[in-house]
């Protein structure tokens, strides 16, 4: 399973324990299909650090866009500079 770079976890999220690894492990414990998990993880990643990880989020969902509708919608949003809450 893909994991965001260690730097994707902000200092404040390290202090509270709400980092990339904590999120990934919570989702991985559930029986969530891989395309849903990867898309949700990309959305989460895109919202970190005021959009600092948008490219990484796009690179994660782009391969799924051809066969998975939610990933296609999110990849289109990222590619066209659409609004993300929290930016």
Image (tube, helix red, strand yellow):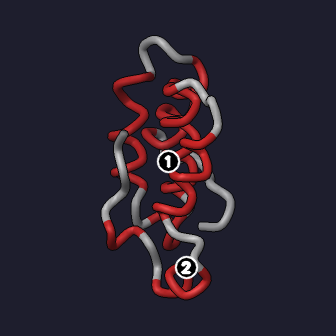
Callout 2: SS: helix
Where in the figure is residue 6, as x and y percent of width and height? 33, 69
Tell me: 63 left or right of 18. Answer: left
Label 2 Cα neighbours within 10 Å, binned few <14 / some 14-19 / many ≥20: some
The residue carrying mark 2 is: 13
* Outermost residue to the front: 29
Q: Any mark on residue 59, and which?
A: none
Residue 81's tag is: 1
Q: Decide: is 69 above or below 29.
A: above
In the image, 39: left or right of 16?
A: left
User: Does label 1 or label 2 sit earlier along the sequence?
Assistant: 2
What secondary structure is marked by label 1? loop
Q: Position of residue 19 (x, y in %)?
A: 51, 69
Q: In the rendering, at what x and y percent does residue 64 appear?
A: 42, 23
* Front-most of residues 86 and 7: 7
Residue 63 in the image: x percent, y percent? 34, 25
Of residues 73 and 27, the one drawn nearer to the viewer in this rendering: 27
Quadrant containing the C terminus in the rendered view: bottom right
Which residue occupies 57% across, 77% down? 17
Q: In this view, does 65 lie above or below 9?
A: above
Separation (CA) of disc 1 from disc 2? 26 Å
Position of residue 39 relative to residue 18, above or below, is above
């Amino acid at each position: 399973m893909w994991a965001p770079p260690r730097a994707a976890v902000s200092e404040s999220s390290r202090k509270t324990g709400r980092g990339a690894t904590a999120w990934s492990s919570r989702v991985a414990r559930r029986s969530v299909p891989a395309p849903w998990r990867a898309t949700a993880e990309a959305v989460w990643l895109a919202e970190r650090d005021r959009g600092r990880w948008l490219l990484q989020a796009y690179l994660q969902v782009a391969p799924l866009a051809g066969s998975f509708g939610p990933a296609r919608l999110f990849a289109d949003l990222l590619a066209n500079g659409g609004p993300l809450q929290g930016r």
